[in-house]
Image (cartoon, rainbow, N blue to C red):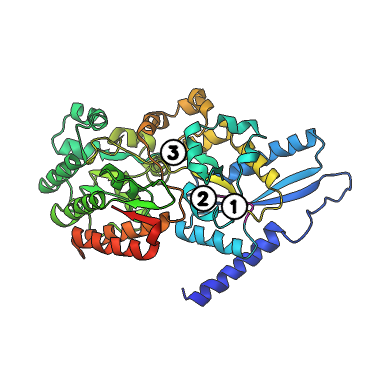
Amino acid sequence: MSKSRFLSSFVVFLLLIAVVGCNRDSKPESRKSGDEPSQVTLVARCKANPPTEEGRCNNLIAAAEAVNAELASRGDKRHIHIEIIQDDKNWANYKTEFELASDAGEAPDIIVSGHEHIGDWAPAGLIIPLTDMLGKSVEFNDVIDSLWRATEWNGERWGVPQDAEVRPFYYSKLLLRKLGWTDGQIESLPNRIKNGEFTWEDMLDTAEQAVQASVVKPGNGWWHRPRNGPDFLYYYFAQGGEIVNNGDALLFDKKAVLKVYQLLYSASQERRVLSKRILGMQPNEWDTAVSSADKILFWFAGSWDWGNWSYNYLRDRGGENYLFKNVGFALIPAGRTGVPITLTHPLVYMISSRCKYPDLALLVIAKATTKELNTPYAVESGHLGILKSQAEYPPYTSAKFLNKMLPLLDFTTFLPNSPYWSTWSEAFFLGIRAVESGDLKPEDALEVVVDRLENELGEHVVIR
């Protein structure tokens, strides 16, 4: 699509929002009877993979009923109506859309996004700090304490956790059996990984054996995600890299990055266990291949993918039962640090600085932050709970997969909330793409990435 055509389409989109949703320049619309409360329309924007993730925005609609009851009980004449915009745009377009809408004065009142966007939107004034308001709603006391860390920037909390997850290492039990593994060896793999006895190198060695034995086709020994995203940061952490500095600059450890590039170059160019076409692969093709458990030996993905595979790809083959029978999961195997790892990327509710009623927006978020509403969403979408009370809540504890995921949080890491994260991530990924395609050797890719970071971030990155 041409740039002018894109801008025209976006203007139309904004006009629709202005007319149908936000009504920012008008007073809250009144009901017909003067004795009835004034209606306040709040617009919520959510990225969600249908149908398993649609609770992100739908829970806000349900929460508005509780808010209206509470407002009425205390004599507040306002009445909340929630309008939602919910689809599954890619993250880059989703983020840009919010920023352009904010600049145009037409941002939604509530937006759900990755916690790392706080590092961009808080300094730019696009969202508001919530620290002083959170104490007004008892629901927030139930949020798992560690998850609040993901919402913090510059000494303030800027969001409320909406979901949590981890990124496991998945493996095909079917293909390991074909490779000659016993059931005992397969079932003990998670513990061996946890104890550091099966490492990243062991994973690649095993994948190479599977290719050589024709258990899998070349390129199908191990797959990672097909596009850039948070997952690649734990590759860096696994090799001893650090990213948070004492100041606001981000760290870039050349030794850790070089090791990552060497592993990926070897996997794709030498061992032939990682497909050279993995980057850019369509999500549907990727999910179809891994969820079947008969084509790919090992893969890295998210805990939320379990629900997606069960519902969207395997319903006619038994859904979750098929997965439990044929797919195993564990921590990401240890790299140079000797410790297995994962990464948690909480999505958070944030309130736009354009919102006229932040008190009501936060009250709606509070009423959505309950075990009764969050648990059905978590179970259906394969996300971990965000509340302390869910640990003993039967509808949550009966979810076998989620319970098995919880111990992985003991090994988790987070993205930095930094305005420089996107630049760091894109540069790091540039090197990944270059070595996996074979365009550059690891040492050359590292040099290119360092030059790019120094040029684009300057004093905001520390190269070591």
Residue 313, image x, y percentages: 38, 46
Percent of width and height locating residue 19: 70, 63
Residue 109, magenta (yes or no): yes
Amino acid carrying label 2: it is Ile
Q: Nearer the viewer, residue 205 or 149?
A: 149
Which sits earlier in the primary sequence, circle 1 or circle 2?
Answer: 2
Q: Is residue 45 left or right of residue 82?
A: left
Q: Amino acid at mark 1?
A: Ile
Label number found at residue 213: none
- Given residues 424 and 50, the one toward you in this image is 424
Q: Which residue is label 2 attached to?
A: 118
The verdict on residue 87 being magenta is no
Quarter assignment of residue 226: bottom left
Q: Residue at x 27, y 42 (%)?
A: 238
- Disc 3: which residue: 382
Three-letter residue code for mark 3: Gly
Q: Which residues are magenta?
A: 108-113
Q: Is residue 140 visible?
A: yes
Residue position for label 1: 127
Q: Is residue 448 above or below residue 110?
A: below
In the rendered view, tell whether residue 460 sits above or below residue 169: below
